[in-house]
Image (cartoon, rainbow, N blue to C red):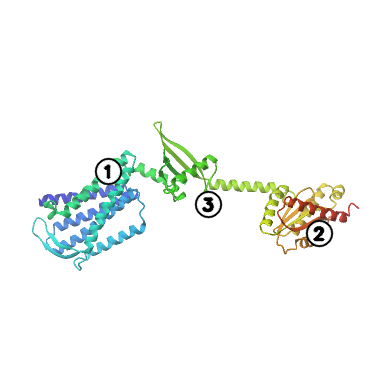
Amino acid sequence: MRNLLLSIQYASIIGLFLESWIIFRRLKNAPLSYLFLSCLAILVNNIGYLFQLLSTNQETYISALRFSYSGRVWITLFLFLFTIELCKIKFPNYFRNTLFIAHILICLSILTLPKHSLYYTWIEFTNEGIFPQLRHGNGIVHHVFMALQIIYIAVGFRWLFRAWKKEKNRMTKKCFMAVIISFFIEFFFFTVQMLKVFEVAKYYDMTIFGYVIGVVVMFVAFFRYDLLGAKEIARDFIIDHLSEGIIAVDTKDNIQYCNKTAVEMFPNIETDSAYIILKIRSSILAKNAISLNNRTYTAEENDLVRDNKKFGKLYVLFDATEHYEHLKKEKYNLQRELRIDPMTGLYNRNGMEYFSDILYKEALQNNKDLFVCICDMNGLKYINDNFGHEEGDRAIKTLSQIIKGAADKDDKAFRIGGDEFLILGVKENSDNAIEYFTTQVEKLTAETNQNSDLPYKIGMSYGPIQQKLKGTPNEFSDMLKASDTLMYEMKKNRDEHRR
């Protein structure tokens, strides 16, 4: 019996080494990484346990025990983390870190044996029987470690059964069942060892069998059914790292899959799935974009069909932010060009129709005055007839600069006709916009005529009005008429060229 058990122990070490090497060469994702770590932990445990079986005194036995437990402490934790990754459980990092710290403390309590009674309350070495043994009393840390292992197994079973039940793919379902079987094997041998059901459990640790057989079953299942093989890894990696959001729903509009990008777009996709699908469909029907987190997306709907059978729909959300920003910029530039008079650089009549409504509402809502002033150039016909139309255009450009300079920085200046201009602005009730504008116009006009070499004088007539708005019908039109009337009265007095 001794030689048989030792042979099994040697064989398990060699097998675990080869299995660890094969898994290491195929490491591509988190589940396989944890499976690899659990294999290493079992390998260390089995090597240490072999040294325990070959020990001849208490000192060498405890040294071997410490080495064995440096692997054994981590086995169930790594298998538990493997289950989390396999079943895609959202497990908070602080819980994960807490478990690691707990196992480090357990490991330290074992490595410092027999200086305290935290793990074993007492120990007694005996060399009677097939193999040497260390009889002991269990301390508080030992009880905590046993409890953690039971919790890992129970919770792991629950997650695996739930994942197996939800899985639709036949091959993946088989693989989940293989993992459940491997967990059951480990739990079975763990229970046998705890209860000492078989005679051999009194002098040989049966959990060694459970760990080795369980990991081998898992290993064969993965590479037999290719659950975590190249195809699956490539698919998950590519789909998760697409810039497009991918959402698949069944015929009842229940979300069956969504990639990482879709989750980032809709963090509440699990709780508000019906609303999100409705929002996507509405945008497709209306041919509108969806705005999320300062990005713009366009959605596309496709039927999921296989063997002429419809399984649901696939929604793809494309990031069209740059495209829409470009269109918005182009639209703005186009609208701006349509509102600008090319000769003077002032706003044109289209600009007046656009801004007049905005400025009127701003003044009315904020209880401010509206400044309106229609301006008309003096003597343009005289300039055109005597100096040509090119010189007339030059005169209009010069006058537009005077108007622009006389207007307040927040005012809008428009060329609304050949030689007609308009100034609009929102003013505080205490502002004397009429006096300011009149002073500026006269000053700039005089400076221009004095400093320029034009063979004629630049001049204009204007009708400034500053008025608190009441919101009555045609109020803005009435202000324009009043300004126009004032402008013509000034023109009668200033039309020197006509006289």
Between discs 1 and 2, the one toward the N terminus:
1
Instruction: Return the residue nearer the eye: 210 or 387.
Output: 210
Question: Could you give the CA–CA distance between mark 1 and mark 3, rounded to whole angstroms?
Answer: 44 Å
| Picture residue at 25% right of the left edge, 55% below the top | 149
Q: CA distance from mark 1 to mark 2?
A: 93 Å
Residue 243 picture location, percent across and down: 47, 46
The amino acid type, in three-letter code, at marker 2 is Thr
In this figure, which residue is indicated by the disc labeled 3? 294
- Could you say whether the residue bearing mark 2 is in a helix, strand or loop? helix
Label 2, on which residue?
445
**Which residue: 25% across, 64% down?**
108
Residue 105 higher or lower than 155, as above or below: below
Mark 3 secondary-structure assignment:
loop
Q: Nearer the viewer, residue 46 or 244?
A: 244
Can residue 215 be seen here? The reply is no
Amino acid type, callout 1: Met
Tell me the kind of residue under disc 3.
Asn
- Disc 1 designates what residue? 177
Crowdedness near tag 1: few (<14), some (14–19) or many (≥20) residues, C-alpha within 10 Å:
some
How far apart marks 3 and 2 lie (CA) works out to 49 Å
Circle 2 Cα neighbour tier, 10 Å, few/some/many (<14 / 14–19 / ≥20):
many
First in sequence: mark 1 or mark 3? 1
Closer mark to the observer between disc 3 and disc 2: 3
Hey, which quadrant is residue 372 in on the image? bottom right
What number is the disc on residue 484? none
Residue 385, percent from left and from top: 87, 47
Residue 128 versus residue 267 in the image, above or below = below
Above or below residue 324? Residue 126 is: below
Residue 338 in the image: x percent, y percent? Answer: 69, 46
The mark closer to the camera, 1 or 2, is 1
Earlier in the chain: of badge 3 and badge 2, it is 3
